[in-house]
Amino acid sequence: MKTIHSKDSSIFISDNTETEKAVIEILKSRWISGREKYGKGINYDQHTDIYDWLDEAIEEAADMLQYLVAMKIRIDKDNKAKN
């Protein structure tokens, strides 16, 4: 596996899998969306009273769990109907 460092310190792997490429594209999209919405990206040294990142992450994880469970139920029901 080759690792290539670009001038801006981003790390790219030259033989990414299709899944890894999809994850990178999702992250890039979220970064762009966040910069458009808030005018900046997230940096570790930002001090803000607006967001508590831990609480925000927990809320997002809870939402993600709901989406995953709903999709799992849908897939299970579809598979059961096919059998």
Image (cartoon, rainbow, N blue to C red):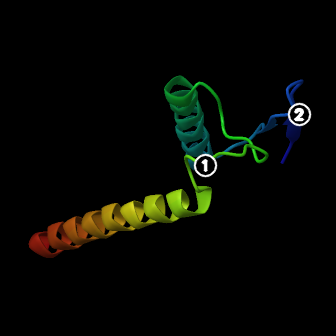
Look at the numbered disc 1 and give the secondary structure of its residue.
loop
Looking at the rendered structure, the kind of residue marked 2 is His
Few, some or many residues within 10 Å of mark 1 (<14, 14–19, 20+): few
Look at the numbered disc 2 and give the secondary structure of its residue.
strand
Q: What residue is shown at x 16% (from left), y 72% (from top)?
A: 77
Of residues 21 and 28, the one nearer the viewer is: 28
User: Reading the chain from its start, which is encountered first: label 2 or label 1?
Assistant: 2
Assign the C terminus to one quadrant of the image.
bottom left
Does 43 sit above or below residue 75? Answer: above
Q: What residue is shown at x 89% (from left), y 33% (from top)?
A: 5
**Residue 80 occupies which quadrant of the picture?**
bottom left
- Where residue 15 appears, as percent x and y from the top left, is 74, 41
Mark number, residue 5? 2
Of residues 64 and 56, the one nearer the viewer is: 56
Few, some or many residues within 10 Å of mark 2 (<14, 14–19, 20+): few
Using the numbered discs, state the Cα–Cα distance from disc 2 to disc 1 in whole angstroms: 34 Å
**Residue, far left:** 81
Looking at the rendered structure, the kind of residue marked 1 is Asp
Q: What residue is shown at x 55% (from left), y 46% (from top)?
A: 50
- Where residue 45 appears, as percent x and y from the top left, is 79, 45
**Residue, far front:** 49
Q: What residue is shown at x 54% (from left), y 30% (from top)?
A: 38
Residue marked by disc 1: 49
